[in-house]
Image: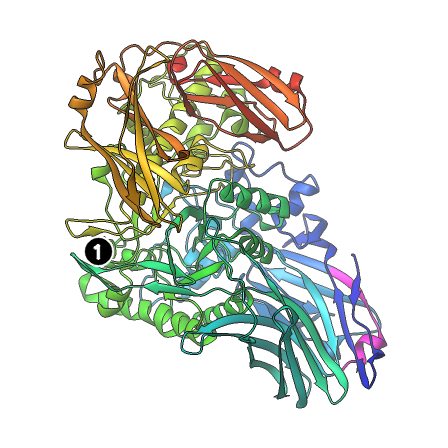
Amino acid sequence: MSLFVRGVCVFLCLFPGVFSVFCSVTRSLDGKWSLSNSDGSVSLPAEVPGCVHSALQQQGYIQDPYFRFNDVSYRWIAFDNWTYTTTFTGSSQLRANQKVLLVFDGVDTAASVWLNGIVIGKTDNMFRRYDFPVRDLLKDGDNVLNVRLLSPVLYASERRKAHSAYRVPPECPPHVQQGECHVNFIRKEQSSFSWDWGPSFPTMGLWKGVRLEAFDVLQLLQVSSVPLHSLSLSQWRVQVELLVDAVQTTNGQIVLSIPELDSEQILQTQFLPGKTKNSFTLNINTSSQVKLWWPNGHGDQPSYHLTVRGFQGRVLILNTESKVYFRSVELVQEPVVGSPGLSFYFRINGKPVFFKGSNWIPAHSFQDQVTPAVLRNLLQSAVDVSMNALRVWGGGVYEQDLFYSLCDEMGIMVWQDFMFACALYPTEDDFIQTVREEVVQQVQRLKSHPSIITWSGNNENEAALATDWFNIPAPQRAAYLRDYVTLYVNNIRALVQEEDQSRPFLVSSPTNGAESEQEGWVAADPYDPHYGDTHFYSYTLDCWDWRTFPRTRFASEYGFQSWPSFSTLQPVSTLEDWSYNSNFSSNRQHHEDGNQQMLLQAALHFKLPNSTDPLKRFTDTLYITQVNTLYITQVMQAQCVKSQTEFYRRSRSEIIEGRGHTMGALYWQLNDVWQAPSWSSIEFGGKWKMLHYFAQNFFAAVLPVGFEDGSTLFVYAVSDLSPDLELRAVVSAYSWSDLDPVCTLKSDLLPVPGGSAAIVFKQPVAALLAGCGSCTRLTCLLTFHLEDSGGQQGPTNHHFLCSPKDAQGLQRPNITAVVQEDQAGYSVTLHSASVAAFVWLDVGNVPGRFSSNGFLMLSRNRTVSFDAWRKTSVEELSRWLTITSLRDVY
């Protein structure tokens, strides 16, 4: 076991007349522990922080849990009880302190804690910090610490049995998910029992740090700083809260300062015995210019250093430093001219901001394997496609501190759910009490982060009640509504509003917001597009038809599945798995009829592949007989989410038939938890799907959006920029059989106000084609971009006049490629003999990403760069490079 000691008894002259004289010792117990199961048949070393599955894999007791069918084969692990044990050395120095605490930052989940053979406490919540006084139990020499974890599956089942008054649905997940039951009765990651995009791995372990904390005077448990702006005074102030554990009543003086802003405050205080929250206010010097934190694409993310020092007389008893960011957030829900209902958008620093982004799920089934590199890669991938927002979904975990710090630095706004999802929950006193402590701890931990823009009580539970997901008999409905209000309103909402007045709170997502509140917190229709946010999924309607999408105020979930690339699936499968009638392919699909839905959606617009080679048949097809493709599913997903996102972005400035003013587009979902089909745009391991490459364009700050309405082509200019622009549309028609444009049309320069969407081109398609000579809907396609007086602004977009499967003249492009290396890195120069749609470059297992991919190639030559994430070579990239276009797969 590693031993880390921080803090000693000191008597130091800090500067003339001021001394530090106090004892504080922090001893880490992280490192090597031992782990055993209930009957002792399995015993092994284990790392802390960690979990049982990771330890078993690291010591060779099990294979990669993600390999083939191991999610099913290893169910036994979660049905056993496991004990973590460590021995640490005690000392008289440690016991000489007035208070010694054993602190667990995260225990997953139901456990009893034993020190030297005595039970010192129990845990029942993965999301809570626990501490236990142990001073009187410590011995000089060896001390034995045991954490005895109960099977989370059996614990949840027992809790369910104990709740006999009425059922709390759902009992179990759908059969296709191959999951475990009663997850809503245990306060742990809800998706660990399975989800429609992830496996069932009910984890156990010490998933965060363990340590001893010893002190004589007081211990600082948490410091938070929340900037608030007074419009009436035109002044910023910082609300600083110190969560302190004091041995006895301690009178003192607190000095708050932000030197960069020439601001300091000296306040008298008294710390009472035990754990107390102490609030202070630092008024910012009005003569100092405060630099504001802005979301990605709207400005910079400057921070300041806040120092907090505590003195008892001339003795320094408390000293800490943290970052503070200045920004304001408002959720605007007010009447909309020409529309029933209310607006729903966020103002950041007084500016309406369109949320562009996605939804975040856990990055791994085993949280100890979510490394800083994994987080940085995923969040940088979000920023690099102009995302400014992520919703941390309520069925996962409250993310680690680094996640939020990176979001602060990168300008990613976070919609933060509390961890309740797609279920009803019990409201017994003990359940409510552990939830209350969970909420307080998480809000205190996270509220200093400017990236967190809003709290949300749960995922889809208002909708579950309103639309009766669980077939609740009418006479019982009132009881479930009372439970809903008890949990989310009377407890979670009340606690959040007490702890944090700096950002809004939403009870659920989707929700009608203020209207839901008026209807008793559960609206008749939480999906009403005139209010709040909406979730929308349709796998049978044509996803290219914008008329099938709700013109909502804010789209917080929408999307389509695709399969990941073969290089992602290959390491967790074998040759016999490489066909879509295999057991492996069925086992990986956890969404009912998911494979069939992808096939049907793709068939609306694409010819399906007809490869006969067995290996190619798998990499190209969903079913051997129906021959859909991995590639085609990614094309379909990318084009579908593109169509829907562009619809939301162009709807920001208009009301049509009472609907519109859309101010958010967060597709489902950003990342994957394992190698399987899902709605993600980034595969497990970090590889970008075609959808993520498409997001580079459809989230661009200035974007042309084209669509047909009544056989008339419209092109909108969408701008997230603050300055007003003057833009024109440049529309070109191309024959499917020719790389040279048939004709090009330009509109006049038209005003596009900052932060708006405006029509810049409008023409009947028949008239446009008539002016292009030989073009018809079947033989031609359109491209378009925006220009100002200085040249092109934003990306080039495309509009298909017919489904690609009906296109006449589309040829095999016979694309060739040359890989080169120069000082900037690697590049691939392509040469095409004809128009090529959805050109996809893949270098197998070489990690990295291209500067562009999945594109429409309308030139004979094109060069893209490749950013390699490890050392590679021209020879390796050339060997693994494959190029696929639409015409190549059938």
Q: Can residue 316 be seen in this view?
A: yes
> In the image shown, does 617 or 23 lie closer to the viewer?
23
Look at the picture and state if 663 lies above or below 163.
above
Say which quadrant the C terminus sits in. Answer: top left
Side of 159 where 740 appears, left or right: left
Check the image and report above or below for 658 versus 92.
above
Residue 63's spot in the image, x, y percent?
62, 36
In this rendering, the answer to whether 431 lies above or below 358 is below
At 43% from the left and 63% from the top, the residue drawn is 349
Which region shows up in magenta? 86-98
Residue 591 visible (yes or no): no
Density class for disc 1 (Cα within 10 Å; few <14, some 14-19, many ≥20) is many
Seen as rendered, the residue at the extreme front is 789
Where residue 889 sits, quadrant-wise, is: top left
Q: Could you tell me residue 48's position as x and y percent? A: 69, 55
Depth order, front residue of 312/753: 753
The residue nearer to you, when weighing 850 against 516, is: 850
List the residue tagged with mark 1. 530
Judge by depth and name the residue closer to the eye, 97 or 557.
557
- Residue at 74% x, 78% y is 215
Residue 619 location, x and y as percent? 46, 20
Up-down relation of residue 335 to residue 35 (above or below): below
Q: Percent position (x, y) of residue 234?
A: 45, 74
Quadrant occupied by the N terminus: bottom right
Residue 89 included in the magenta stretch of the image: yes
Residue type at the position of mark 1:
His
- Horizontally, residue 138 falls left or right of residue 300, namely right
Q: Quadrant of residue 598?
A: top left
Q: Which colour scheme is used?
A: rainbow
Q: How many marks?
A: 1
